[in-house]
Amino acid sequence: MARAAFDVTAMRRALELAARGRGFVEPNPLVGAVVIRDGEIVGEGWHERFGGPHAEVAALRAAGSQARGATLCVTLEPCCHHGKTPPCTDAIRAAGIARVIVAAGDPFPAVAGRGIEALRAAGIDVETGLLAAEAERLTAPFRTLVTQGRPWVIAKWAMSLDGRLTASPGQDRWISSVESRGIVHDLRSRIDAIAVGIDTAVADDPLLTARPADGSSAGPRQPLRIVFDSQARLPLTSKLVRTARQLTVLVAVGPRAPHDRVAALEAAGCEVWRGDEADPAARTAALLAELGRRRLTNLLVEGGPTLLAGMLAADQVDEVWAFVAPIILGGGTTGGSAPLQDVPRLAVEHVSFPGGDILIRGTIGNRLVTSPECRG
């Protein structure tokens, strides 16, 4: 295999490794690295958990003495500052790496090109931009947090072929298949927070936890549970409130929420966040900024229709997971008010068929924060 072609193969392997850290490393980015020598991978690693060794260090340790004079492929610009771990640029230099291929730059202000500069200053050959788009997509939540101060927002819904998100009262509330719901629970276990509107919280009385079908432990962690509830109407008898002392529930209320209702929710163990903005979109933006200050990297919004429609209209959604069930519920549908040329367009990244449903995933608009310094 030609050297350039093998570089691509090695970087793809690094991207695969990086994805293994999803749900474990946040708010840090997903990063993978491989060491290649004479057309072979002699060491590989990824950032496995927050506070643990970075991908470069893990790969260099695996390569051992074979790292001297070798090439390191890494999906994100190596850090050059002291954080929870020492600078990766120091480890790369000490290992005797001769060449580093970086897929994408790191927007974090303490790095932001300085890592590449440090390597070059040490006499190491540095190449940038290999599979940059893939690496930037992988780290999109991290990039959004760093550059916009808010989490990456994933909107998820299940609907019938005729566009219904809910069945008639008294019917089974599950539109999607068991397999589709299993995918959602896996997603829940790998994100930082999950949110619903108050109407969904009242109608469905959900737990909003990650619960795998096999009953095993639910992945890396349980998400923060959030209810958009402008008037503090969340029932004290709801599952969310009754479990608030075990798993945090944040109730986002508006400026006119009754003080007695807020006090009752707080007394029951809920955290209440009060937004001062009268406009729902502005209040949602303020909450997203608050979640960013708390270093939450990604937020899953599961409904209901009013909350989803409002966030989509306010351009506050970055990614969509839409499950389309092969059923027709009837009852009519209504069109949107925006001109077709102005509605958000989805860049489809994935289509599959769990349990006979259709799962469509993609990003909305130009959501990715690119790295011009790593574009060749």
Image (cartoon, rainbow, N blue to C red):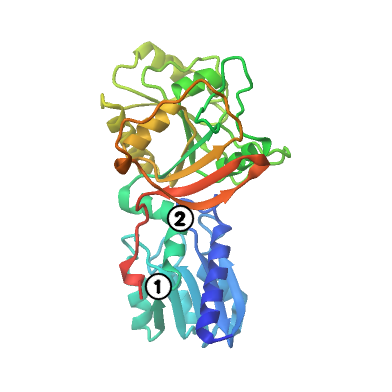
The numbered dot on residue 129 is: 1
**Measured along the vertical axis of the image, is residue 191 above or below residue 65?**
above
Task: Report which quarter residue 370 is drawn in.
Answer: bottom left
Under mark 2, the amino acid is: Asn
Q: Position of residue 193 (x, y in %)?
A: 48, 38
Q: Earlier in the sequence, mark 2 or mark 1?
A: 2
Q: Which residue is mark 2?
A: 28
- Quadrant of the frame with the N terminus: bottom right
Seen in the image, is 146 located left or right of residue 155? left
Please report the residue visible at 33 percent of the width from the left and 47 percent of the height from the top: 149
Residue at the right extreme?
214
Q: Position of residue 110 (x, y in %)?
A: 33, 63
What's the CA distance linking mark 2 and mark 1? 21 Å
Residue at the top extreme?
260
Q: Position of residue 145 (x, y in %)?
A: 37, 50
Task: Report which quarter residue 64 is drawn in.
Answer: bottom right
